[in-house]
Amino acid sequence: MNYAICPLSVAPIRSTSSDSSEMVSQLLFGEMVEVLEKRGKNWSKVRCIWDNYIGWVDTKQIRPITPTEFESYQNNFAYSIELVQGAMTSGHYVPVTIGATLPQFDGVNFNLDGSSYTFSGQAIVPSDFQPNAELLIKIARRYLYAPYLWGGRSAFGIDCSGFTQIIFKMIGVKLPRDSSQQVEEGEMVDFVEQAQAGDLAFFENKKGKISHVGVLLGDNKIIHSSGQVRIDKMDHFGIFNVDTEKYTHKLRVTKRVLPTQPKSSKKEESDESAISNQIEIF
């Protein structure tokens, strides 16, 4: 297999091998792909390692890596939780966005594409803790006011399912790319009144198809990307926009992806300590 990694802040994934074609998703710094096909010198058809999403990227915007590097990067990494932070290498900076992957990060340095980088921002290692709603929501709030962008996955432009996917990714939970795929994950929550913070709420369009997703915050509120990443009211009808005072999205179903957190016990103290340490960095 041929693997590659994204060495840029953000690289578009397009539906066809053309700069004018629709952007369907994005690669963030440090994310890896399998190269499936090449079209001339300019375009590569890739499969994203994280979610198996397939599309076309500009070949100049990814760098080949060896199978050994691929395994090493997959098993040792952290995620940046800074909105934007410069990673320094060879006398210049690369802007790194929230959600970017830092391969072989040791707290100060990481390696990518044969180069050593220095990163002074905050980062988390998802393998250090159990996925939990409190950390998820703290990460989600960092995206507030990020503009909506179809196909986007960064704080400079993000769509609804890109938002849910990337914040769950940072706590070690895999979600597919699109809301119509994400709705297949997790367990059904029968009534919205039974929903918990961290649950996913899915909404349907006029044709009855899943077209939107957001994360419940508790207290009848939801954080989602619609125009911008925002917090609105939520009930069994759907999302009530606090600015326009109108319902904007019709609720279809609520799903629980995160495990229900049991009450604390002495046996769980070490896990809770690790979670607390991660949360305290915010």
Image (tube, rainbow, N blue to C red):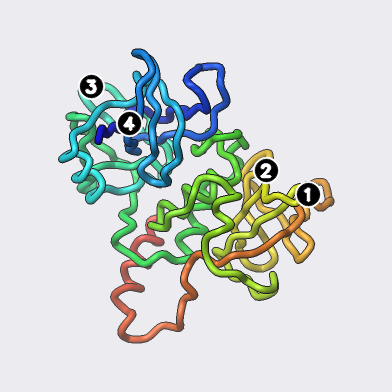
Q: Toward which corner of the image does residue 159 lie, by quadrant?
A: top right
* Residue at numbered disc 1: 248
Which residue appears at 35% of the width and 73% of the height? 272
* Residue at numbered disc 3: 91
State how far apart marks 2 and 1 are (Cα): 9 Å
- Nearer the camera: disc 2 or disc 3: 2
Furthest residue in direction bottom, as rendered: 266
The C terminus, quarter of image: bottom left
User: Where does residue 185 sit, x and y in percent of width and height?
Assistant: 52, 60
Q: Nearer the viewer, residue 126 or 42?
A: 42
- How many residues crowd around disc 1 within 10 Å: few (fewer than 14), some, or many (20 or more)? some
On residue 35, the disc is: 4
User: Where does residue 20 sit, x and y in percent of width and height?
Assistant: 56, 17
Which residue appears at 26% of the width and 29% of the height? 88
Q: Judge from the rendering whether residue 120 lies leftward or rightward of residue 115; answer left or right.
A: right
- Nearer the camera: disc 1 or disc 3: 1
Q: Judge from the rendering whether residue 271 lies leftward or rightward of residue 156; answer left or right.
A: left
- How many residues crowd around disc 2 within 10 Å: few (fewer than 14), some, or many (20 or more)? many
